[in-house]
Image (spheres, helix red, strand yellow):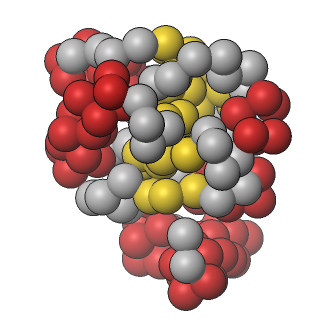
């Protein structure tokens, strides 16, 4: 995730919180609620925290470049990002070993679903699009 992307997310969150404090329900709150239509690449715990705090529901794909099943799952993850109101994030376990350990990722692919800032589901292995979409939508408000 680039510095520009992080700054955009922080700015959206700041505007959303200011709008809530004013109680005006302004358009900035709605803009901040819009999820990205592409998977967001996360590098480190702070990046993940920013994505999770900015979006109500986040599906995080812990993957490795050398992992065949992870490569099979890639089109499904992209399709989910485009077709759901949840944000989809990707974490390279080789580059983020501490983060993977924090969420007890022992095999890849592992997906962790966050709802309202909390990890609520963990799935290991390749899953179909419909299964993942149903899981994500069951946590959307």
**Quadrant including the N terminus:** bottom right
Evaluate whether residue 3 shows in this view. yes
What residue lies at 61% left-to-right and 83% top-to-bottom?
3
Asked whether, in this view, residue 80 is left or right of residue 64, the answer is left
Asked whether, in this view, residue 101 is left or right of residue 37, the answer is right
Count of labels in the image: 0
Evaluate whether residue 134 shows in this view. no
Looking at the image, residue 39 lies above or below residue 100: below
Instruction: Return the x and y of residue 132 as percentages of the image width and height.
Output: 31, 21
Q: Compare residues 3 and 31 and report the one nearer the observer.
A: 3
Q: Could you say which quadrant of the image residue 127 lies in?
A: top left
Instruction: Return the x and y of residue 66 as percentages of the image width and height.
Output: 43, 37
Instruction: Return the x and y of residue 58 as percentages of the image width and height.
Output: 50, 40
Q: Compare residues 38 and 86 and report the one nearer the observer.
A: 38
Q: Could you say which quadrant of the image residue 37 lies in?
A: bottom left
Looking at the image, residue 71 lies above or below residue 83: above
What residue lies at 56% left-to-right and 46% top-to-bottom?
92
**Quadrant including the C terminus:** top left
Looking at the image, residue 129 lies above or below residue 34: above
Q: Compare residues 92 and 135 and report the one nearer the observer.
A: 92
What residue lies at 33% left-to-right and 16% top-to-bottom?
126
Instruction: Return the x and y of residue 5 as percentages of the image width and height.
Output: 52, 78
What residue lies at 70% left-to-right and 33% top-to-bottom?
100
């Amino acid at each position: 995730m680039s510095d520009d992307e992080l700054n955009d997310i922080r700015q959206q969150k700041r505007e959303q919180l200011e709008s809530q404090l004013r109680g005006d329900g302004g358009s900035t709150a709605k803009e901040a609620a819009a999820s990205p239509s592409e998977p967001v690449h996360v590098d480190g715990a702070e990046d993940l925290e920013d994505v999770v705090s900015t979006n109500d529901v986040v599906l995080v794909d812990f993957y490795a470049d050398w992992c065949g099943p992870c490569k099979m799952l890639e089109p499904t993850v992209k399709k989910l990002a485009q077709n759901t109101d949840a944000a989809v994030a990707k974490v390279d376990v080789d580059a983020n070993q501490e983060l993977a350990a924090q969420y007890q990722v022992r095999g890849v692919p592992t997906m962790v679903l966050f709802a309202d800032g909390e990890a609520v589901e963990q799935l290991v292995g390749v899953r179909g699009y419909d299964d993942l979409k149903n899981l994500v939508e069951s946590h959307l408000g």
